[in-house]
Amino acid sequence: MAEIFALLIFVALFAIGAVRGVHIGVLMIAGAAGTGIVLAGMEVKEIVEGFPLNIMILLVGVTYFFAIAQTNGTIDALIDRALTKVGNRAALLPLVFFLLTMGIASMGAPLAGLVMMPVAMQVARRYGIDFALMGLAVCFAIGAGGFAPTSLYGIVTYGTAHSAGISLHPFVLFGIAVATYVIMLAVSYTMFGRSLMRTQTSAQRSIDVPDLATARAQGNHPSEQETALNRGKASIASGDFLSDDDEAMYSSADADNESVAVQKLTTVQILTVVMIVALIGAVIALAAFGKEPDIGILCFAFASVLTLIDPSTGKNSVSKIDWSTVLLVGGIITFVGVLEHMGAVDLLGEAAKSAGSPIVAAFVLCLVGGLVSAFASTTGILAALVPLALPLIADGSLPGWALIAALGICSAVVDVSPFSTLGATVVATAPEEDKPRLVRVLTRFGLSMVVIGPVALIGLLVVPTMLAS
């Protein structure tokens, strides 16, 4: 009975945090302490030991290193160079924005890729690209980059798997995620890009790609973006859409058709690029020699070099560490540790097994992950649901790495829903006249992935692995 009551507290804290707008990590740590002491008779020391220090080091190290790269202008300079290479080949632009945004999202915080959304929508308007195609391309890129070994979704998924003794290689997870999202992008091209492909062979538009500085000047400051996102979500729920003033924040005015001047990289920026390449090379080299690379420690090492070279940037970047996510993930995993101590996780695993065959149980778990994630924090869902899959893996009936990878990606592919942060940003940054259509398109697309994701990933990943073993 105590286990069921603890689970109800866990779910209630999620609901209260969402309704009241309270940080769920704060509630989870307090709830874990209260539940552990009162219902499980645990000592405070035992409860605190459940806080995932290894994941915290990963998150802090990665977000700090790439915050330095963002603050000193290296990331923006690299993006500007990439955009100027495209010219007026409109059909390639969604793919280009997919690659650029994926690179940004792989640098610690997936939602950092949202910085590309206003720029992408400006480009879509100028080139006549379907806003649904461009918005989906950016959303898919954030999901794919988020599962990189250096980014949040990947860290939480493979970090939780490793702590449970499940061998899930970070690059395998990343590769599966990228392949999934590339297929989704290809499908989106067939659905929304056919007219673009036809017009590409006709008269070309002489239109420039706006640089990131212009996009920020038009309203991509963090405080303004956050405000517009909140208004966008509220307007979707009520059926109304953003005002002309809000639209002006994100829509580009007709700009002069002048080439974007690409400035030379500074010495600090060149050194930052070298550090990024060295980080990637170190991770690949260690993995190739059978070592387990500690990406968080590596990021701290390279970040310390950049900090010594440019102390002011290093100091300013400390405030950009994703402390909110550290607290969110830490709080949830700490509470899950209390649930595991009480046997509540095993209880849920047994309940899932009772659904029928192991494949049915895996499908139900992925389905629940996708459905809840469409309306809630993907990071929170990953931290909560991945441990719940462990009882299904313990008896050897399901391949652990395949199920964890499928569960993680199923929880992320639904984020294009207009009720999640990514989908709401697409709607908020689109022109006023296209918002109603985008809400319909993204709702259908996002909710369809609640079912399509588990069917595809369980069918193509888990089942073949089971048959081969």
Image (cartoon, grey):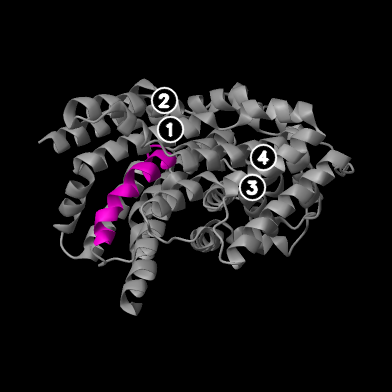
Residue at the left extreme, as displayed: 1
Q: Earlier in the sequence, mark 1 or mark 4?
A: 4
- Tell whether 274 sits left or right of 181: right
- Tell whether 266 sits left or right of 229: right
Is 390 magenta? The answer is: yes
Q: Position of residue 168 (x, y in %)?
A: 44, 60
Q: Is residue 76 positioned above or below 179 on the image?
A: above
Q: Is residue 36 positioned above or below 114 on the image?
A: above
**Circles 1 and 2: CB distance less than 8 Å?**
yes
Tell me the CA gap for discs 4 and 3. Answer: 9 Å
Question: Label 3 amino acid?
Answer: Leu
The residue tagged 1 is 328
SS assignment for the magenta stretch, majority? helix
Tell me the CA gap for discs 1 and 4. Answer: 20 Å
Q: Is residue 129 positioned above or below 116 on the image?
A: below
Q: Residues within 10 Å of mark 1 (few under 14, many from 20)?
A: many
The residue tagged 2 is 23
Question: Label 1 amino acid?
Answer: Leu
The residue tagged 3 is 298
Q: Residues within 10 Å of mark 4 (few under 14, many from 20)?
A: many
Task: Magenta stretch: give its range.
Answer: 374-394
Is 63 magenta? The answer is: no
Q: Residue at x 77, y 41 (%)?
A: 74
What kind of element bears circle 2?
A: loop
Q: Earlier in the sequence, mark 3 or mark 1?
A: 3
Tell me the CA gap for discs 3 and 2. Answer: 29 Å
